[in-house]
Image (cartoon, rainbow, N blue to C red):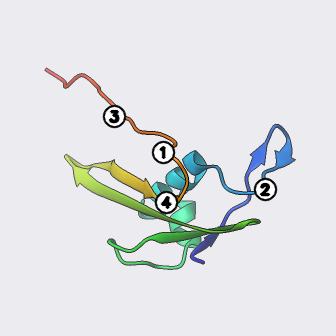
Amino acid sequence: MDILVRMISAGQPHKATPLTGAMCTAVAARIPGSLAQRLARPRGAAEDLRVAHPSGILPVTARTSLRDGALLAEETVVYRTARRLMEGMVVYPTPG
């Protein structure tokens, strides 16, 4: 494992790590100086972050980049063997 996570849902400890929480944790681990980055075992930029939780270990990939001094979350990937759980795009207006 690279980081140990405990999630609370409706006031109770979650039995696993929800995928959205794992994805956000992986991105946070790529932000220099963030709490997640300081706590996680160092990994190469192309390596999965292995998120440990009460039910096991979930590998998550997060790709970030810097653009005009701002950190961008380019992509997160969660590996599951079950059905597709989500797919989406974020659309936002460009300035100017």
Kind of residue sitting beneath label 1: Arg
Q: Residue 43's quadrant in the figure?
A: bottom left
Q: CA distance from mark 3 to mark 1?
A: 15 Å
Of the numbered discs 2 and 4, the one sitting upstream in the chain is 2
Q: Are marks 2 and 4 in contact (CB under 8 Å)?
A: no
State the residue position of label 3: 89
Q: Position of residue 88 (x, y in %)?
A: 38, 35
In the shown orientation, is residue 65 left or right of residue 96? right
Looking at the rendered image, the disc whose residue lies closer to the viewer, 3 or 4, is 3
Kind of residue sitting beneath label 4: Ala
Q: Are marks 2 and 1 in contact (CB under 8 Å)?
A: no
Q: Position of residue 33 (x, y in %)?
A: 47, 64
Looking at the rendered image, the disc whose residue lies closer to the viewer, 1 or 4, is 1
Q: Position of residue 84 (x, y in %)?
A: 48, 45
Of the numbered discs 1 and 4, the one sitting upstream in the chain is 4
State the residue position of label 2: 15
- Residue at the spot 40% in from the left edge and 59% down from the top edge: 62
Q: Position of residue 51 (x, y in %)?
A: 59, 67
Callout 1: 10 Å neighbours few (<14), some, many (20+)?
few
Of the numbered discs 2 and 1, the one sitting upstream in the chain is 2
Kind of residue sitting beneath label 3: Met
Of the numbered discs 3 and 2, the one sitting upstream in the chain is 2
Q: Are marks 3 and 1 in contact (CB under 8 Å)?
A: no
Q: CA distance from mark 3 to mark 2?
A: 28 Å
- Count of picture labels: 4
In the shown orientation, is residue 53 left or right of residue 93? right
State the residue position of label 4: 26
Q: CA distance from mark 1 to mark 4?
A: 20 Å
